[in-house]
Protein backbone atom coordinates (compact mmCIF):
# COMPACT_ATOMS: atom_id res chain seq x y z
CA UNK A 1 0.00 0.00 0.00
CA UNK A 2 2.76 2.42 0.91
CA UNK A 3 4.70 1.73 -2.28
CA UNK A 4 1.59 2.33 -4.40
CA UNK A 5 0.92 5.62 -2.64
CA UNK A 6 4.52 6.80 -3.20
CA UNK A 7 4.33 5.77 -6.86
CA UNK A 8 1.04 7.62 -7.32
CA UNK A 9 2.41 10.80 -5.71
CA UNK A 10 5.52 10.59 -7.91
CA UNK A 11 3.42 10.22 -11.04
CA UNK A 12 1.26 13.20 -9.97
CA UNK A 13 4.37 15.34 -9.41
CA UNK A 14 5.66 14.49 -12.88
CA UNK A 15 2.32 15.40 -14.47
CA UNK A 16 2.15 18.74 -12.59
CA UNK A 17 5.73 19.60 -13.52
CA UNK A 18 5.14 18.75 -17.16
CA UNK A 19 2.04 20.93 -17.25
CA UNK A 20 3.73 23.95 -15.62
CA UNK A 21 5.53 26.57 -17.73
CA UNK A 22 9.33 26.35 -17.61
CA UNK A 23 10.98 29.04 -15.50
CA UNK A 24 13.58 31.12 -17.34
CA UNK A 25 17.22 30.71 -16.37
CA UNK A 26 17.87 33.37 -13.69
CA UNK A 27 21.23 34.59 -15.08
CA UNK A 28 21.95 36.41 -18.33
CA UNK A 29 24.91 38.17 -19.92
CA UNK A 30 25.34 41.25 -22.10
CA UNK A 31 28.38 42.86 -23.72
CA UNK A 32 28.17 46.65 -24.19
CA UNK A 33 30.25 49.02 -26.30
CA UNK A 34 29.91 52.80 -26.30
CA UNK A 35 31.34 55.97 -27.81
CA UNK A 36 30.61 59.41 -26.38
CA UNK A 37 31.83 62.70 -25.00
CA UNK A 38 32.88 63.76 -21.50
CA UNK A 39 32.96 67.31 -20.18
CA UNK A 40 35.88 67.81 -17.81
CA UNK A 41 36.50 70.25 -14.96
CA UNK A 42 40.30 70.64 -15.37
CA UNK A 43 40.33 73.91 -13.40
CA UNK A 44 43.99 73.84 -12.27
CA UNK A 45 45.26 72.58 -15.62
CA UNK A 46 43.29 75.20 -17.53
CA UNK A 47 44.69 77.98 -15.31
CA UNK A 48 48.17 76.75 -16.22
CA UNK A 49 47.24 76.58 -19.93
CA UNK A 50 45.90 80.14 -19.76
CA UNK A 51 49.14 81.36 -18.22
CA UNK A 52 51.25 79.65 -20.90
CA UNK A 53 48.98 80.95 -23.65
CA UNK A 54 49.38 84.52 -22.42
CA UNK A 55 53.12 84.21 -21.87
CA UNK A 56 53.81 82.76 -25.32
CA UNK A 57 51.17 84.78 -27.16
CA UNK A 58 49.67 81.74 -28.88
CA UNK A 59 46.18 80.44 -29.54
CA UNK A 60 45.56 77.41 -27.28
CA UNK A 61 42.13 76.10 -26.26
CA UNK A 62 41.38 74.96 -22.74
CA UNK A 63 41.02 71.22 -22.15
CA UNK A 64 37.32 70.98 -21.23
CA UNK A 65 35.98 67.94 -23.10
CA UNK A 66 37.05 64.91 -25.09
CA UNK A 67 35.96 61.70 -26.75
CA UNK A 68 35.39 58.67 -24.48
CA UNK A 69 35.23 54.97 -25.38
CA UNK A 70 33.91 52.14 -23.21
CA UNK A 71 33.37 48.38 -23.24
CA UNK A 72 31.54 46.57 -20.48
CA UNK A 73 30.32 43.13 -19.48
CA UNK A 74 27.14 42.65 -17.43
CA UNK A 75 25.87 39.60 -15.55
CA UNK A 76 22.10 39.97 -15.12
CA UNK A 77 20.05 38.41 -12.32
CA UNK A 78 16.37 37.76 -13.12
CA UNK A 79 16.68 40.34 -15.92
CA UNK A 80 16.35 43.13 -13.34
CA UNK A 81 19.81 43.94 -12.00
CA UNK A 82 23.37 43.29 -13.09
CA UNK A 83 26.91 43.36 -11.81
CA UNK A 84 29.12 45.24 -14.28
CA UNK A 85 32.82 45.36 -15.09
CA UNK A 86 34.40 47.40 -17.84
CA UNK A 87 37.10 49.55 -19.37
CA UNK A 88 37.02 53.18 -20.54
CA UNK A 89 39.51 55.27 -22.45
CA UNK A 90 39.57 59.07 -22.46
CA UNK A 91 41.29 61.14 -25.13
CA UNK A 92 42.27 64.48 -23.61
CA UNK A 93 44.35 66.79 -25.81
CA UNK A 94 44.68 70.42 -26.81
CA UNK A 95 47.22 71.97 -29.20
CA UNK A 96 48.19 75.39 -30.55
CA UNK A 97 48.27 75.88 -34.30
CA UNK A 98 49.74 78.29 -36.82
CA UNK A 99 52.53 79.78 -34.70
CA UNK A 100 56.31 79.52 -34.59
CA UNK A 101 55.95 77.91 -31.16
CA UNK A 102 53.76 74.80 -30.91
CA UNK A 103 52.42 73.66 -27.55
CA UNK A 104 50.52 70.41 -26.92
CA UNK A 105 48.97 69.02 -23.74
CA UNK A 106 47.89 65.37 -23.61
CA UNK A 107 46.25 63.47 -20.74
CA UNK A 108 45.15 60.07 -22.11
CA UNK A 109 43.63 57.91 -19.36
CA UNK A 110 42.73 54.25 -18.90
CA UNK A 111 39.82 53.68 -16.51
CA UNK A 112 38.70 50.31 -15.11
CA UNK A 113 35.17 50.16 -13.68
CA UNK A 114 33.24 47.88 -11.33
CA UNK A 115 29.61 48.55 -10.47
CA UNK A 116 25.94 47.65 -10.71
CA UNK A 117 22.92 48.59 -12.81
CA UNK A 118 19.20 48.20 -11.95
CA UNK A 119 16.19 48.24 -14.27
CA UNK A 120 13.60 50.75 -13.03
CA UNK A 121 11.01 50.80 -15.84
CA UNK A 122 10.20 48.47 -18.70
CA UNK A 123 7.97 49.40 -21.61
CA UNK A 124 7.10 45.97 -22.95
CA UNK A 125 8.79 45.19 -26.28
CA UNK A 126 10.00 48.79 -26.47
CA UNK A 127 12.77 49.86 -24.06
CA UNK A 128 14.14 49.68 -20.52
CA UNK A 129 15.14 52.59 -18.27
CA UNK A 130 17.95 51.81 -15.83
CA UNK A 131 20.16 53.46 -13.22
CA UNK A 132 23.80 52.50 -12.71
CA UNK A 133 26.82 53.33 -10.54
CA UNK A 134 30.50 52.50 -11.05
CA UNK A 135 33.67 52.64 -9.02
CA UNK A 136 36.45 53.96 -11.29
CA UNK A 137 40.16 53.12 -11.06
CA UNK A 138 42.15 55.42 -13.35
CA UNK A 139 45.69 55.33 -14.72
CA UNK A 140 46.73 58.47 -16.58
CA UNK A 141 49.68 60.03 -18.40
CA UNK A 142 50.37 63.78 -18.51
CA UNK A 143 52.51 65.11 -21.36
CA UNK A 144 53.37 68.66 -22.38
CA UNK A 145 55.30 69.12 -25.60
CA UNK A 146 56.71 72.51 -26.59
CA UNK A 147 58.25 72.77 -30.05
CA UNK A 148 60.18 75.78 -31.28
CA UNK A 149 63.68 76.31 -32.68
CA UNK A 150 65.12 74.09 -29.93
CA UNK A 151 62.36 71.42 -30.21
CA UNK A 152 62.10 71.14 -26.42
CA UNK A 153 59.97 68.38 -24.86
CA UNK A 154 58.92 68.34 -21.21
CA UNK A 155 59.19 64.91 -19.49
CA UNK A 156 56.13 62.67 -19.24
CA UNK A 157 54.36 62.01 -15.94
CA UNK A 158 52.11 59.20 -14.71
CA UNK A 159 49.41 59.12 -12.04
CA UNK A 160 46.59 56.96 -10.73
CA UNK A 161 43.54 57.55 -8.55
CA UNK A 162 39.92 56.43 -8.06
CA UNK A 163 36.47 57.97 -8.37
CA UNK A 164 32.89 57.14 -9.29
CA UNK A 165 30.23 57.39 -12.01
CA UNK A 166 26.43 57.57 -11.71
CA UNK A 167 24.26 57.42 -14.82
CA UNK A 168 20.83 56.79 -16.30
CA UNK A 169 20.47 54.52 -19.31
CA UNK A 170 17.70 53.79 -21.80
CA UNK A 171 18.08 50.89 -24.23
CA UNK A 172 15.82 49.19 -26.76
CA UNK A 173 14.08 45.83 -26.27
CA UNK A 174 12.51 45.29 -29.72
CA UNK A 175 15.71 44.33 -31.59
CA UNK A 176 16.66 41.27 -29.50
CA UNK A 177 19.36 40.18 -28.96
CA UNK A 178 20.70 43.63 -29.96
CA UNK A 179 20.19 46.61 -27.66
CA UNK A 180 20.81 50.20 -28.78
CA UNK A 181 21.03 52.70 -25.96
CA UNK A 182 21.94 56.09 -24.54
CA UNK A 183 23.66 56.89 -21.25
CA UNK A 184 23.73 60.23 -19.47
CA UNK A 185 25.63 60.62 -16.23
CA UNK A 186 28.12 62.39 -13.99
CA UNK A 187 31.68 61.35 -13.19
CA UNK A 188 33.65 62.36 -10.11
CA UNK A 189 37.28 61.51 -10.91
CA UNK A 190 40.39 63.57 -10.14
CA UNK A 191 43.97 62.33 -10.39
CA UNK A 192 45.58 64.39 -7.67
CA UNK A 193 49.28 63.91 -8.30
CA UNK A 194 51.72 62.76 -10.97
CA UNK A 195 55.29 61.53 -10.83
CA UNK A 196 58.01 61.82 -13.45
CA UNK A 197 58.19 58.56 -15.41
CA UNK A 198 62.00 58.71 -15.49
CA UNK A 199 63.03 59.70 -11.96
CA UNK A 200 59.85 59.23 -9.88
CA UNK A 201 59.83 62.82 -8.60
CA UNK A 202 56.52 64.62 -8.09
CA UNK A 203 55.43 66.68 -11.09
CA UNK A 204 54.51 70.36 -10.79
CA UNK A 205 53.15 73.07 -13.04
CA UNK A 206 55.33 76.11 -13.80
CA UNK A 207 53.84 77.99 -10.82
CA UNK A 208 54.90 75.19 -8.44
CA UNK A 209 51.43 73.67 -7.96
CA UNK A 210 51.15 69.87 -8.17
CA UNK A 211 50.13 68.51 -11.56
CA UNK A 212 46.60 67.13 -11.39
CA UNK A 213 43.99 66.13 -13.96
CA UNK A 214 40.29 66.51 -13.10
CA UNK A 215 37.95 64.45 -15.28
CA UNK A 216 34.90 65.29 -13.14
CA UNK A 217 31.88 66.33 -15.17
CA UNK A 218 28.86 65.28 -17.21
CA UNK A 219 29.24 62.56 -19.84
CA UNK A 220 27.12 60.74 -22.38
CA UNK A 221 27.51 57.58 -24.44
CA UNK A 222 25.74 56.07 -27.42
CA UNK A 223 25.84 52.32 -26.82
CA UNK A 224 25.29 49.04 -28.63
CA UNK A 225 24.98 45.73 -26.81
CA UNK A 226 24.34 42.06 -27.47
CA UNK A 227 22.45 40.15 -24.79
CA UNK A 228 22.20 36.40 -24.24
Image: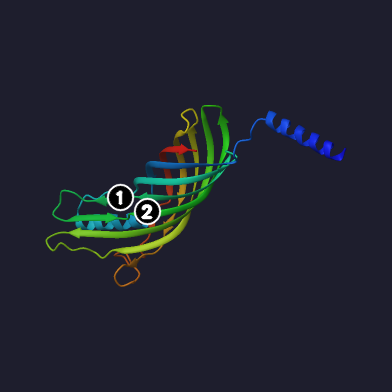
Residue 192 picture location, percent across and down: 41, 62
User: 207 or 98: which is nearer to us?
Assistant: 98
Determine the residue positioned at 15% across, 62% down: 151
Q: Which residue is mark 2?
A: 42
Task: Please give left or right for residue 142 compared with residue 115 in the image.
Answer: left
Binning the other alpha carbons within 10 Å of mark 2 as few (below 14), some (14 to 19) or many (20 upward) gives some
SS for callout 2: loop
Q: Which residue is at the far right?
A: 1
Q: Which mark is residue 112?
A: none
Reading the image, the residue beneath label 1 is 62
Residue plotted at (41% across, 40% down): 221
Report x, y in % for residue 103.
Answer: 21, 55
Number of residue marks: 2
Which residue is nearer to you in this view: 54 or 228?
Answer: 228
Percent position of residue 22, x then y: 64, 33
Q: How crowded is the residue under tag 1: few (<14 C-alpha within 10 Å), some, or many (20+)?
A: some
Q: Position of residue 59 (x, y in %)?
A: 22, 49
Estimate the spatial distance between the alpha carbons at disc 1 and disc 2, rounded to whole Å.
9 Å
The quarter of the image holding the N terminus is: top right
Q: Secondary structure at mark 1?
A: loop
The reply to whether the C-beta atoms of the residues labelled 1 and 2 are less than 8 Å apart is yes
Q: Nearer the viewer, residue 87 or 199?
A: 87
- What colour scheme was applied to this rendering of the protein? rainbow
Please name the residue shown 36% across and 50% down the image.
90
Where 8 falls versus 54 (above or below)? above
Looking at the image, tell me whether mark 1 or mark 2 is earlier in sequence order.
2
Query: Dividing the picture into quarters, in which one does residue 203 lie?
Result: bottom left
Horizontally, residue 199 falls left or right of residue 41, namely: left
Amino acid sequence: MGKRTIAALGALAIIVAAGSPAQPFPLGFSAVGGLGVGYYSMSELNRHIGSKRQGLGIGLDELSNGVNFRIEGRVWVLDRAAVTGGYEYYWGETSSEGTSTSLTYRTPTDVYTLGAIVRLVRIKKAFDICLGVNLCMAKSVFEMKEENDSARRIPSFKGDDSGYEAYAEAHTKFLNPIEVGFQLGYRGLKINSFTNIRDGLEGTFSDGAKINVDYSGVFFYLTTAIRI
